[in-house]
Image (cartoon, rainbow, N blue to C red):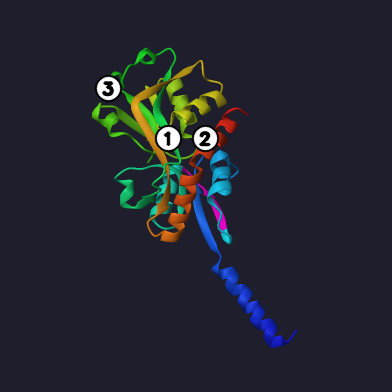
Amino acid sequence: MNKALLILLITVLKGLGASAETLRISVYDFPPHIFVQNGKPQGPGITFYQTYLNHTPGVKLQWIATPFARVLQDLQHGKTDVALFLARSPEREKFLRFSDTALFTTSSAIIVRSDSPLVKAKSLKDFKGLTLGHSKDSFTPHELIRQGIKIEALSGEDVIERNIQKLRYKRLDGIFIPTASNGEYILHKIKAEKEFQLFIVPNSNLNLHIAFSKNIEEKTFQRIEKALKKNHDAYRKLLEQQLHK
């Protein structure tokens, strides 16, 4: 091959490689939706994105697993482009963009000891003045604060399991869980369904969205939004498969 032609071919190929899009996706350990093991995420949330939302050739996915608080920071500062399973709020919308279509809808819950009078709770009023464990920077309904409920935030890994130890020794009155499915899974995982129970917070429907950095390209946002809207129902089927394993 002519040397000049070879050099031109190499230059073109390098140019094509450089133009390939890399989408940096933040995730956190959020069973049964996402499991992070040895820094590698898996689960129905990951499968759904790879199967139904990534149809553009040349887009490379870079999965970045971090504690929940870091997910928000990385998106805000442009270190990542996308995150899965985030609740929308006016405060977060100041520095993030959210999918119009929800990825998953659930209810909030509070884990209480089975020997506690709180198992008979009827509303959040029964928790007035009490202290609930929670994940730092995670979604906290304003209604909890209005009811005089105190939040003891915990950061890092395995927050729910660590808070369960506190609850076990009565260092907390309960544990607030933004998504009931997460609490149910954790109690099943540690075989503690008899020791603890879930109080489902009334009227606490919560939509979890795909979140984007504010500087996400419009074409990327619209591509993902369109695929999410079209394939939304497929996620519930993947989740059911996970729950029945």
Residue 128: numbered disc: 3
Mark 3 vs mark 2: which is more N-terminal?
3
Q: Nearer the viewer, mark 3 or mark 2?
A: 2
Q: Are marks 3 and 2 in contact (CB under 8 Å)?
A: no
Left/right of residue 129 with respect to residue 49 in the rendered view: left
Q: Nearer the viewer, residue 149 or 177?
A: 177
Q: Which residues are magenta?
A: 60-67
Q: Circle 2 — which element? A: helix
Q: Residue at x 49, y 16 (%)?
A: 195
Quarter location, residue 47: top right
Left/right of residue 208 with respect to residue 10 in the rendered view: left
**Residue 64: x and y, percent?**
52, 50
Is residue 66 part of the magenta span, yes or no? yes
Is residue 21 part of the magenta span, yes or no? no
- How many numbered marks are there? 3
From what the image shows, is residue 125 above or below residue 32? above
**Residue 223: x and y, percent?**
47, 55
Position of the N terminus, as image quadrant, is bottom right
Left/right of residue 170 with respect to residue 61 in the rendered view: left
Question: Circle 2: is it few (<14), some (14-19), or many (20+) Cα within 10 Å?
Answer: some
Asked whether residue 6 appears in the rendered view, the answer is yes
- Real-space Cα distance between discs 3 and 2? 35 Å
- According to the image, label 1 marks what residue? 105
Residue 236: numbered disc: 2
Mark 1 vs mark 3: which is more N-terminal?
1
Q: Residue at x 58, y 74 (%)?
A: 15
